[in-house]
Amino acid sequence: MVSLNNLRPKPGSVRRNKRLGTGSGSGHGQTSTKGQKGQSATAGGTKRSGFEGGQMPLSRRIPKSGFSNNRFRIDCEWVNISSLDKRFDNGEEVTPEKLVQKRLVKHSKRVKILGDGELKKSLKVLAHAFSASAKEKIEKAGGTASVIAVPSGVGK
């Protein structure tokens, strides 16, 4: 009969912990399974990822080529006009600060309005940039699309 006092794990499923440095009789004494000296036997003896024993690492052996435009990239947050249609009322003024309040963008440094979706409300939209289709759809709905000048030094 099985009861709490005679429950045992399946034989071979539970192993004893390897107790290191507990004397020569344990089988894991003296060097504690780490061998004789060497970098990995000493305290703090680890190698960084990619280390190849002093050999020139692969990441440095491979030739680097190409051009990265990241230094000149202009970070811009974008909003589709379908989002404006959902979040703003008819005749309301849309500014980057209001877009931050409505959580459509994270910051109001640079905002671009894109033309994905439909706009059925007449909105006065102020942003740093507009796509051609967004400007067309805003004006078709009876609203205005005004470009705000970007403050100097705001590119990143």
Image (tube, helix red, strand yellow):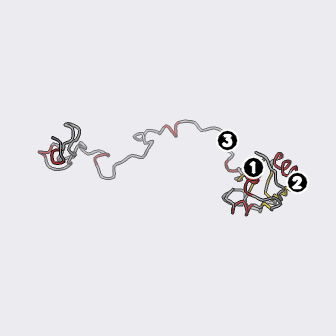
Indicate the quadrant where residue 105 lies. Answer: bottom right
At a point 71% along the width and 60% down the height, the residue shown is: 108
* Vertical position of residue 94 compared to residue 83: above or below: below
Q: CA distance from mark 3 to mark 2?
A: 44 Å
Amino acid type at circle 1 is Ser
Residue 17 percent across, percent down from the top left: 22, 46
> Separation of disc 2 and disc 1 at Cα?
15 Å
Amino acid carrying mark 3 in the image: Phe
Give me the disc on residue 35.
none
Look at 11% across and 45% down and name the residue there: 25
Task: Please identify the quadrant where the C terminus is shown.
Answer: bottom right
Examine the image and state in which quarter residue 37 appears: top left
The residue labelled by disc 2 is 142
Quadrant of the frame with the N terminus? top left
Q: Secondary structure at mark 1?
A: helix
Q: Nearer the viewer, mark 1 or mark 3?
A: 1
Q: Percent position (x, y) of residue 41? A: 28, 46
Position of residue 53 relative to residue 73, above or below, is: above
The label shown at residue 67 is 3
Question: Residue 39: where, in percent of width, then height?
Answer: 32, 46
44 with respect to 77 (left or right): left
Mark 2 surroundings: few (<14), some (14-19) or many (≥20) residues within 10 A? some
